[in-house]
């Protein structure tokens, strides 16, 4: 199989290649194409991949492209992990939001809206190239905000699109461990995961092992709850009140004041920190003391250790568990998707993915992309049946979906008014006046938003 990775100069590409190197089964990926507009970043990433493949028999061939039309033909799968505006754009998204007293995280709140408004037009152009040069390929979207971009692409690529995120899988794994099943494969046939919501806005409502739901017993034990990351973030009392475990990104909603204060007091925003870190990584040359792979691994470890640091500061700093520092996990999800859809897996797979609602959740229309368990095989992907959203989730999901829809309307139609509505309706933007100022601020900073009129 041929896998083409869009955003091939991205920092996390070696995680994908590592998963491909470990896959020795029939039907594996034999060629990885990396596309990026930045040839310098491509070269740096390629040097890391070359070290990863050293001594590995039959390692997937790596090819580099700066032209999209040249990279796409013959692709079986296309994996998108682009970042329009780079880390400098993310840093600006966060800074402008904080200047107006609003949380600016890249996918949650004002920063996510700005990011989507820049990314959707690029995603539309990419979809056009895919239709022309690789119409049979499956498109796996990891580009953030994942739910919004997946919803746009689904219409443009006739449904051969799926969105992925590593957060739900990580949550399920940690909860299983806290429930007394450490090391149990969350994708094993005897494990069932009842997770539902939108991307970065979902809840784990049930967790079965051999048909028995182990989540109620876990939630009843405050010490066990606060032994894993989400329990430490939210606290046992809140999880027990919900009767569910929220996705880590819901911390921005449930602890808005605390998170805003932590971001305002931080020496640098997450985006600014990563911008400096990655600039140093890509600019550094080889040395006798540290190879490209060693340098990448050192920077990756620092990146993982500081992940969601402001959120942890907001509730009292705690260190991340060693198991959570090993990698995002999205690379394993992407590999499982490719194997299941190509028929190489030999059986259907169950994964938590971003797909059109198609009647799964009442209150959302057919095309609204949600994040929920799916069944995958050579015939495609379908969402598994799910119980309706509980009251504590329904209103928030509906509101945020309306924000996503207004953002898409703004990007596809060039409507400034729709963008204004998106900012004003968002639960983390608590003032129409602030929403107007945010829109003005983002448009003044990003020339790419001049299409909004």
Image (cartoon, rainbow, N blue to C red):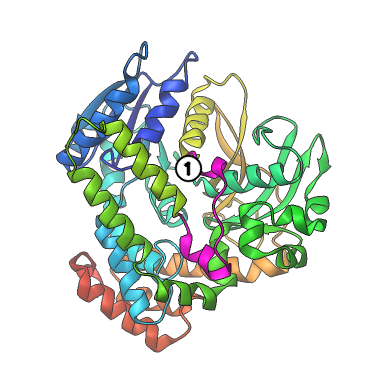
| Residue at horizontal 40 percent and vertical 21 percent from the top | 29
- 320 inside magenta stretch: yes
SS for callout 1:
loop
Residue 175 x/y as whole percent: 69, 47
Q: In front: 95, or 198?
A: 95
Extreme residue toward the bottom, this view: 433
Q: Mark yes or no: residue 137 visible.
A: no
Q: Is residue 97 left or right of residue 66?
A: right
| Residue at horizontal 49 percent and vertical 44 percent from the top | 164
Q: How many marks?
A: 1
Q: Is residue 327 left or right of residue 9?
A: right
Write down the quadrant of residue 193 in the picture.
top right
Q: Which quadrant, please, contains the C terminus?
A: bottom left
Q: Mark yes or no: residue 98 visible.
A: yes
Q: Is 268 located above or below residue 147 in the figure?
A: below
Write down the quadrant of residue 91 in the picture.
bottom left
Q: Which residues are magenta?
A: 307-328
| Residue at horizontal 38 percent and vertical 49 percent from the top | 143
Q: Is residue 34 left or right of residue 432?
A: left
Q: Which quadrant, please, contains the N terminus?
A: top left
Residue 322 x/y as whole percent: 55, 42
- 145 inside magenta stretch: no
Residue 116 x/y as whole percent: 36, 61
Q: In front: 36, or 154?
A: 36
Q: In front: 135, or 3?
A: 3
């Amino acid at each position: 199989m041929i896998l083409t990775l869009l955003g091939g100069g991205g920092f996390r590409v070696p995680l994908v290649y590592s998963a491909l190197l470990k896959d020795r089964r029939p039907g594996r990926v034999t060629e990885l194409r990396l596309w990026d507009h930045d040839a310098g970043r491509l070269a740096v990433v390629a040097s890391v991949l070359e070290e990863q493949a050293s001594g590995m028999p039959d390692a997937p061939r790596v090819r580099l492209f700066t032209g999209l039309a040249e990279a796409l033909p013959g692709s079986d799968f296309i994996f998108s992990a682009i970042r329009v505006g780079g880390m400098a754009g993310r840093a600006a998204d966060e800074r402008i939001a904080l200047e107006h007293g609003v949380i600016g995280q890249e996918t949650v709140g004002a920063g996510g809206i700005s990011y989507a408004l820049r990314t959707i037009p690029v995603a539309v152009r990419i979809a056009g190239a895919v239709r022309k040069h690789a119409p049979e390929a499956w498109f796996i979207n990891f580009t953030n905000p994942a739910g919004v971009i997946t919803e746009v692409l689904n219409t443009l690529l006739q449904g051969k699109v799926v969105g992925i995120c590593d957060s739900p899988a990580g949550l399920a794994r940690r909860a299983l461990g806290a429930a007394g099943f450490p090391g149990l494969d969350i994708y094993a046939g005897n494990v069932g995961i009842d997770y539902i919501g939108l991307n970065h806005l979902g809840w784990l409502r049930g967790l079965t092992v051999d048909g028995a739901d182990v989540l109620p017993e876990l939630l009843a034990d405050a010490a066990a709850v606060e032994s894993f990351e989400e329990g430490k973030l939210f606290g046992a009392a809140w999880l027990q009140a919900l009767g569910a475990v929220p996705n880590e990104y819901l911390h921005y909603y449930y602890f808005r004041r605390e998170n805003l204060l932590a971001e305002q007091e931080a020496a640098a925003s997450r985006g600014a920190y990563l911008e400096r870190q990655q600039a140093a990584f890509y600019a550094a040359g080889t040395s006798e003391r540290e190879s490209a792979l060693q340098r990448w691994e050192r920077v990756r470890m620092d990146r993982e250790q500081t992940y969601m640091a402001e959120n942890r500061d907001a509730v009292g700093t705690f260190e991340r568990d060693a198991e959570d520092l090993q990698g995002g996990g999205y690379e394993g999800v992407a590999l499982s998707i490719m194997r299941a859809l190509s028929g190489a897996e030999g059986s259907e797979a169950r994964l938590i993915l971003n797909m059109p609602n198609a009647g799964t959740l009442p209150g959302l229309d057919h095309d609204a992309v949600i994040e929920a368990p799916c069944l995958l095989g050579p015939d495609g992907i379908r969402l598994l049946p799910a119980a309706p959203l509980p009251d504590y989730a329904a209103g928030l999901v509906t509101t945020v979906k309306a924000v996503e829809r207004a953002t898409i309307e703004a990007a596809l139609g060039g409507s400034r008014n729709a963008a204004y509505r998106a900012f004003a309706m968002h639960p983390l933007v608590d003032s129409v006046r602030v929403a107007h100022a945010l829109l003005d601020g983002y448009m003044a900073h990003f020339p790419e938003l001049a299409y909004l009129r």
